[in-house]
Image (cartoon, coloured by chain):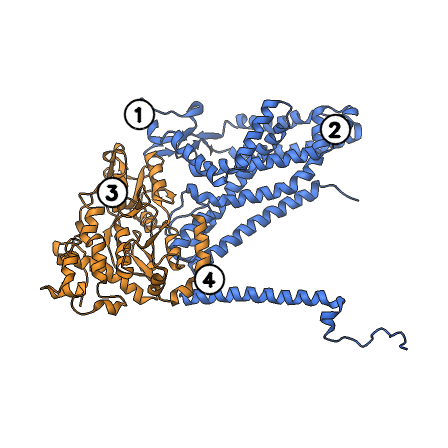
Amino acid sequence: MSAITDPDKGGFRPSMLLYDTRYRSMTIQIIALVGFLIAIGWLVSNTAQNLADLGKPLGFSFLWEPAGYDINQRLIEYNSQMTHARASLVGVLNTMLVALLGCITATVIGVLVGVMRLSKNWLVSRLMTIYIEGFRNVPVLLWILITMAIFIEVFPQPRDFRGEDAVASMSLFDSVALTNRGIYIPAPTWFAGSGAVIAVFLASIVGMVFFGKWARKRQEQTGQILPTFWIKLAIFFVPAILAYYILGKPIGLEYPELKGFNFKGGFYMRNSLIALWFALSLYTAAFIAETVRSGIQAVAKGQSEAAAALGLRQGRITSLVVLPQALRVIIPPMISQYLNLTKNSSLAIAVGYMDITGTLGGITLNQTGREMECLMILMAIYLAISLTISTVMNWYNDRVKLQER
Amino acid sequence: MKKSVFLGTLAAASVAAGVAAAGTLDDVKAAGELKCGVSTGLVGFAAADASGKWNGFDVDVCRAVAAAVLGDGSKVKFVPTTGKTRFTALASGEVDMLARNTTWTFSRDVDLKFEFVGVNYYDGQGFMVPKALGVTSAKDLDGATVCIQTGTTTELNLADFFRSNNISYEPVPVETNAETQAQYLAGACDVYTTDASGLAATRATFENPDDHTVLPEIISKEPLGPLVRHGDNQWGDIVRWTLNALITAEELGVTSANVAQMSGAAGGNPEVNRLLGTEGDLGAMLGLDKAWASRAIANAGNYGEIFATNIGEASPIGIARGLNAPWTDGGLIYSPPFR
């Protein structure tokens, strides 16, 4: 004869942690979290203990000792008497240089190839397919090594440029030297008045941006379309060229010249930089091309047909209708391609390019024997670079993505 | 290559203390083979032949230790290491000893926590250039492009040499000897610098060795020797005294040809008797048997024989004994007495 039992108002009992569905999942999560933290703590203390037993307790003071080694490509001042920290910074800059150059070239090549792969021309689209499959399916290390090997074997050594009947000669009106040690190109030299030319050039870039905004506003108000591309081109070049001649050619060119063992003067792009840059760009471009193709194909065919029905020309359909929608699909996977390229640049040591893995993770690690510390810093640096890239790209993605209201 | 650095480091972090605590001798006996770190390929010192068999000056040191400890000089697992990976490989216990043209320096001995057991080759850093360049002295190398193996003392000596002579150069860091050769032969660098012995060995493998010359300057002292980890003194003693046994054997005239007969019965020379275990029991002090040294010598001969077969003047490498002659002939090769 039991009456209906009242709902339990007895408050909280410990057994409810396990048997009450309201608390059970939280209990399990807390236990898992504690277990995870214990495992991490054990790993850390075990490592610290073992390093201490080896007589190598964690310490970062080695970073402020003289490095003692030289680095060939330096974007900032460095010599062998400076610290390991400075050498690492030189390496970081070299990593960022090749990553930046690589991302730009990979994007240009990737977009072109991606569009060409969709071409109705059978030969073009097949060739692009071969390129994409060839590069995507072979490890990038092999591409880096083979680029370097070809570079070294194909181009002449500086010695071949010497003498009356030299085997090799400089290209492009004797201004560029292609050697197996790298490419030497003329560098600008600045005389009095060159600052004014640069100021004019910068001002014309600003003017170009403002003109673009003005032209768009005008188009929205009146419907008239200006030939903005040609006008922008004129704004870009004409004032700077005029200023250059009016001020009496204040910017000259310094040509590379063979002096002693090597060419001197001009910009010197080392074979290791070129091989790494070239291989990383071509490899990543193959992935970007596929991303671009998928982005374009993701835009429904009805969109471009509708635009055509409205009377838009082919170029405008692409730039106004297809690309803005395709970009929304393309950009998120593109971020990870940029991250891949940056991380793959750590293969630089295969061709002797002194990036951060070559300096901090290579010579410094080897000379000081601080494996743990060097690798921890190295990981932190790559993490920081990667997070920066994704932040910037996510910001851009937010700007172009569909604005939902 | 890069992978092994990372793996090695991980291993160093997790395993090292365990390895250092346990006796390496017991580990080697339990495994039935000696893991010996050698170079990735330097003809005359350590290189695998067409059938995969390792030969060379450093290789024979490994084999002698294996013969002393395990009784069989063929029970060696050779682990090729680059200039960069070698120390991590040793510190992590991936190898039991390192015999790889490694220069004995203060910081490696003290700071990297290794034990150099002796010197088996007195070397110095030199420069090789093509004869066509017409260079006769290293001081003429202003502005030259120099190929170096990265992760070596060579790199630091090079920086010091050019800085102290106030001349400029362009370093090209390369990972292995083979890659350096390719760059040097293609003219991607003007100069190849490494230990003079390595230059001689490399030059011997060129198609036209006579087109290349080693400059007279020796810019550093490079005492090369086998090394083990700090902290296992018994194992360090075994490797040290195996090397010393080879050196003493040359001094006392014990060769691979007569070692069997001489260890058969005690002879007239007490030091030979102690070395070969026919008198006293030096082996037991090391934790080995009496015949350890005679097996080490029987494997590839004494120090002089090993030198002659692999890198001596009759071999393709053709290095003169020079500093590496026994002290009785005016060289530096000298072993403490066996007593």
Asked if residue B53 is positioned above or below residue A52 in the image, the reply reads: above
Quick check: marks 2 and 3 in contact, CB under 8 Å?
no
Amino acid type of the residue that numbered disc 4 sits on in the rendered structure: Ser
Please give the label number shown on residue A304: 2
Instruction: State the image quarter where residue A365 is shown.
Output: bottom left
Amino acid type of the residue that numbered disc 3 sits on in the rendered structure: Ala
Residue B233 shown left or right of residue B258 in the figure: right
Please state which of residues A144 and A208 is positioned toward the viewer in this rendering: A144
Name the front one of labels 4 and 1: 4
Q: Is residue A60 visible?
A: no
Quadrant containing the C terminus of chain B is bottom left
Name the front one of labels 4 and 2: 4
Please give the letter of the chain rendered in orange. B
Asked if residue A209 is positioned above or below residue A93 in the image, the reply reads: above
Kindly indicate whether the residues beneath marks 4 and 2 are on one polypeptide chain: no
Residue carrying label 1: A163
Please provide percent x and percent y for residue A73. Answer: 43, 42
Kindly indicate whether the residues beneath marks 2 and 3 are on one polypeptide chain: no
Name the front one of labels 1 and 3: 3
Distance from the alpha carbon under mark 1 to that under mark 3? 31 Å
Distance from the alpha carbon under mark 2 to that under mark 1? 62 Å
Please provide percent x and percent y for residue A358. Answer: 44, 47
Q: Earlier in the sequence, mark 4 or mark 3?
A: 4
Kindly indicate whether the residues beneath marks 4 and 3 are on one polypeptide chain: yes
Asked if residue A280 is positioned above or below residue B65 in the image, the reply reads: above
Residue carrying label 3: B200
Identified at 76% across, 75% down, the residue is A12
Please state which of residues A198 and B312 is positioned toward the viewer in this rendering: B312
**Which secondary structure, mark 2?**
helix
| Chain identity of mark 4 | B
Please give the label number shown on residue B14: 4
